[in-house]
Amino acid sequence: MTTKDKSKMADEAQPGGKKKLIIIAVLTIVLLGGGGAGAWFFLNDASPSPDTAQSAGSASQSAPAVQESAYYVILPQPFIFNVTGDARDRLVQVKVQLMVRGDNNEEIARQHIPLIESTLLQTFGAATVEQLRTPTGRLELRGQSLTAVQEALLKVSGRQTVERVLFTGFVMQ
């Protein structure tokens, strides 16, 4: 058998060899292109170009600053209090958490927990059974609680500190 015969046999043994090589090359290029596009998309710098920054200058002045992370301050004890009603008085238990933004506000809220608890107890004491029976009444009480806590903290720390008062547990008997 000559070398010419051997090369003919090799060509006949691999009829789709070149096709497989082309398919693998095309798939490799597509995968690398997709990976590169994905990396560019996720790692692209989100800062605007100078042209865009100048045209959006007035819009960025009116936009609020980037918000800090939200932290939740759990008040250690649930509030247990009596509320008056038409037929009889009821006993209410409320578990409360405070939502604050940033480490500094979290520290201020934790430092003034006794003031916050006292303020909330006064606000809860003014509620009635009729108010607490409805979801709207509970939302109203939560809004009053937020306002009272923000005013109390504003007097001592110079900041409102608390963004939301959350009722994480509410039982009325």
Image (spheres, grey):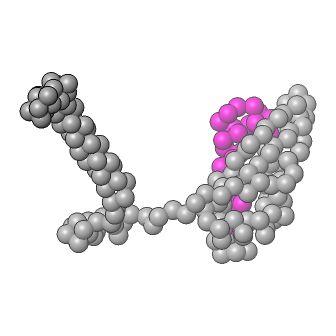
Q: Position of residue 139 (x, y in %)?
A: 66, 41
Location of residue 4 with respect to 139 vertically, above or below: above
Q: Name the quadrant containing residue 137.
A: top right
Residue 21 visible here: yes
Location of residue 1 with respect to 156 vertically, above or below: above
Q: Nearer the viewer, residue 166 or 29?
A: 29
Decide if residue 23 is on the left or right side of residue 96.
Answer: left
Q: Nearer the viewer, residue 73 or 136?
A: 73
Q: Position of residue 58 (x, y in %)?
A: 28, 68
Residue sitting at x 35%, y 70%:
61
Decide if residue 17 is on the left or right side of residue 2.
Answer: right
Q: Nearer the viewer, residue 125 or 107?
A: 107
User: Residue 140 in magenta?
Assistant: yes
Q: Name the quadrant containing residue 31.
A: top left
Residue sitting at x 66%, y 58%:
71
Residue sitting at x 84%, y 33%:
172
Location of residue 19 with respect to 50 vertically, above or below: above
Main secondary structure found in the magenta portion:
helix
Report the quarter where the C terminus lies: top right
Report the quarter where the N terminus lies: top left
Q: Which residues are magenta?
A: 128-153
Residue 126 visible here: no
